[in-house]
Amino acid sequence: MTIKRIIQEELGKTLEEYGFKFTKAEPCFWPYEREKDGIRQEIVVARDRYEKGYIKMIFSTNAYGQRPKEFRDFVPEEGAKKWDYWGYENEEQLREVLREFKRLILAYGFDFVEEISKPSTDAIPTEEANRYLLEHHQELYIEYQERLKAKGKEVKEVIAIIYERLKEMLDEPFSQVENTLMGMAALYGHTISWISRGEWMWDEKRGGCLVEKILGTKERIRPLNLLIEVWDWMRKHKNIESDILYYKYKMILIYYYRKHPEEIEYDD
């Protein structure tokens, strides 16, 4: 059976009535997309990569901070919540599943797409701020070394200092902490690349300041976006135990010491 044709017959026509258009099938993915008020909205039929008789729906937009979701993430019905992939054994069962998908989309899916077409937060790293960081990261690094008393500290100590400052800012509005987050992004980016062993550049594809080739590895970070995301997560979840800044550095070290095992220090 031709899955693309069946999807179009059972589901695609309804999506097209709401302005979605089939874009381009990829292995295991059949996407429909529309643009509304400058936001790209996408509804995808996805098949399990390893088990051909299982499919699901994925809903996403390019609104800042929004993540792809499935029926079980937002449909209140028990039948939709207990399934990851929905199984079928033949064409008729596939059609039955797709008809159920259509019912759920009409009942909940289109409204949900509108919900996730708005940014999930006011803490949005702008292109302007990223460009400023790229152009001034060196002087910001020097300034925030002094401001946070991080000069001469080990990498983990500097990260701990950054976290302590983040905790102090959790009740402040983003507009008042944005510049501080930019300064700490410069401090973090230089510190984990051992001051100068990383290339600061502009990420043309995603539009942001990027540090790549950190310690000669293939690892890269977008320092401003990362610091904003960590601060935003901490304030939203009322959780001061985030460790993502440590984790990023740890991954860099793993790849670095694979290339330089002779530098590994062992405890006696």
Image: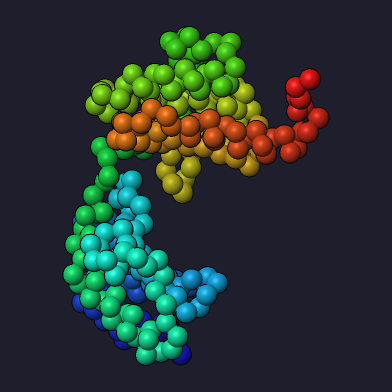
In depth, the one of 24 and 168 nearer the eye is: 168
Residue 234 visible (yes or no): yes
The image quarter containing residue 255 is top right
Tell me the quarter of the image containing the C terminus.
top right
Residue sticking out furthest to the right: 262
- Above or below for 107 versus 256: below
x then y, percent, for residue 57: 35, 68
Foreground of the two, 207 or 262: 262
User: In the figure, is residue 8 to the left or right of 25?
Assistant: left
Q: Is residue 131 among what the camera can see?
A: no
Q: Quadrant of residue 214?
A: top right
Q: From what the image shows, is residue 219 above or below residue 185?
A: below
Where does residue 143 sit, x and y in percent of width and height?
A: 45, 13
The answer to which image quadrant residue 100 occupies is bottom left
Could you tell me which residue is drawn at 48 percent across and 9 percent down?
Answer: 149
Residue in the image at 39% along x and 74% along y? 86
Q: Is residue 121 left or right of residue 152?
A: left
Coloring scheme of the render?
A: rainbow
